[in-house]
Amino acid sequence: MLPADLSIDLRQLVMTIANTVDLVGVDDVMHGRRVGMLAREMAIRMGWCEADQLMLYDAGLLHDCGVSSTRVHHRLVIDLEWAGAEEHCIRGDELLANFPPLAHLAPIIRYHHSAWEWLVTQSLPGNTARFANLIYLADRIDVLAAPYHADQSVLSHADEIRTRLASARGRLFSPELVDAFELISQEEAFWLAMQPEWVQQYQVEMESYGELKMIGWAEFKQCATIFSRIIDAKSPYTEQHSQGVARLSRHLAEKFGLDAITCEKIEVAGLLHDIGKLQIPDEIIEGESALTAHEFDIMKSHSYGTLQVLKRLHAIAEIARWASLHHETPDGHGYPFHIGGAELPIEARIINVADIFQALAQDRPYRKSMTPDQILAILQERANLGRADPGVVRLVADDLAECHRIAICLE
């Protein structure tokens, strides 16, 4: 049985994916939003049709959906050209190609770091080369301008940026697009619009722009799987973590006797629970020793980040709450909300146990994976201390081998 009453605005979903992707920027969470804005505004000024303008905005928002690593993101936003850039383009294409509501963006994302001189030799359909190259140009405009936003000195560097991009005319970028950029960027407003407050205002205005399109539960669940793949790609040590948590959460919910619709929702909450972890620096995720107090404080922010990203999707408010409470504990000493006792829903308690189980069943930089018996011993100790739900832990004990198989995603 599926949650038949769920309907989500596709534009809101695109914005949510964009905000998720932008988390990887850590210190600059506006890159995708600026690229989308720049691409759309240039398309408007070049007289391209309204449908193409909106598509380019969405492509700009999501162009880096194949990036999960903060290290990779750093390279992408400091170098005009980088030999390793194509990997995230391929991954972004793979993530969206089989998701019908956004599949039309996949080819643009696939080629958004491809040089124009190469693109024109390919037999790409329609305007794929032109659209992808505009995203590439908008992306590099933002990369070159970004260092000057903090002290508001971008106008002083506009000529320098124009000159640098003009030097790649016909090689990296289409002459048509470079010429349009040089003309449009003579206006101070072009550069001033990239300030954070105006980018946010632009996004708010775009949230209600265009035709209203709704998606149902099946498509949203498919999109949640895309989210989980973005999250789990952050580190080789977290591969399939979210999917393992989702599957184990559903299994335990079914064993607990929760209804079919709740089991569906708890599975999706498991897929989404670690969205906020995208903003955690790779060095902390992959640290080979115990976290310092400061690093642990940074790590604690990820559950809160999950809630902040998901709460714009009002139709899944319940799912967002369960996902964000996955580090809360019955004794009220978890984080980041210190919710415990009767206030802590069983769905969050189940995800908490599933999260711990799956993490312990995987290798980490500082330890090898644990055996099912070792994992159960830790869960039982946590239950005795009020740090895990005893009833959920008993379900694990009664079905240990199957829980382990599900957690590590064995078929």
Image (spheres, helix red, strand yellow):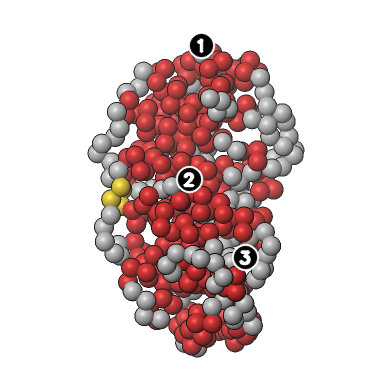
Seen from the viewer's position, the closer of residues 201 and 112 is 112
As helix, strand or loop, the secondary structure at mark 1 comes to helix
Q: Residue at x 56, y 54 (%)?
A: 90
Tally of marks: 3
Percent position of residue 386, x then y: 53, 22
Q: Is 32 positioned to the left or the right of 40 in the image? A: right
Q: Is 283 positioned to the left or the right of 184 in the image? A: right
Determine if residue 73 is in view: no
Q: Residue at x 54, y 78 (%)?
A: 174
As helix, strand or loop, the secondary structure at mark 3 comes to loop
Res 77 label: 3
Seen from the viewer's position, the closer of residues 164 and 94 is 94
> Is residue 364 depicted above or below 204 in this figure?
above
How many angstroms separate mark 2 from mark 1 (CA)?
31 Å
Which of the image's four quarters has the N terminus? top left
As helix, strand or loop, the secondary structure at mark 2 comes to helix
The amino acid beneath tag 2 is Phe
* Earlier-in-chain disc, 2 versus 1: 2
Q: Residue at x 40, y 54 (%)?
A: 102
Mark 2 crowd level (few <14, some 14–19, many ≥20, 10 Å Cα): many
* Earlier-in-chain disc, 1 versus 3: 3
How many angstroms separate mark 1 from mark 3 (CA)?
50 Å
Q: Residue at x 26, y 36 (%)?
A: 4
Residue bearing mark 2: 227
The amino acid beneath tag 3 is Val
Percent position of residue 126, x then y: 42, 67
Quadrant of residue 371 within the rendered picture: top right
Q: Is 347 positioned to the left or the right of 191 in the image? A: left
Percent position of residue 66, x then y: 55, 53
Q: Residue furthest top?
A: 398
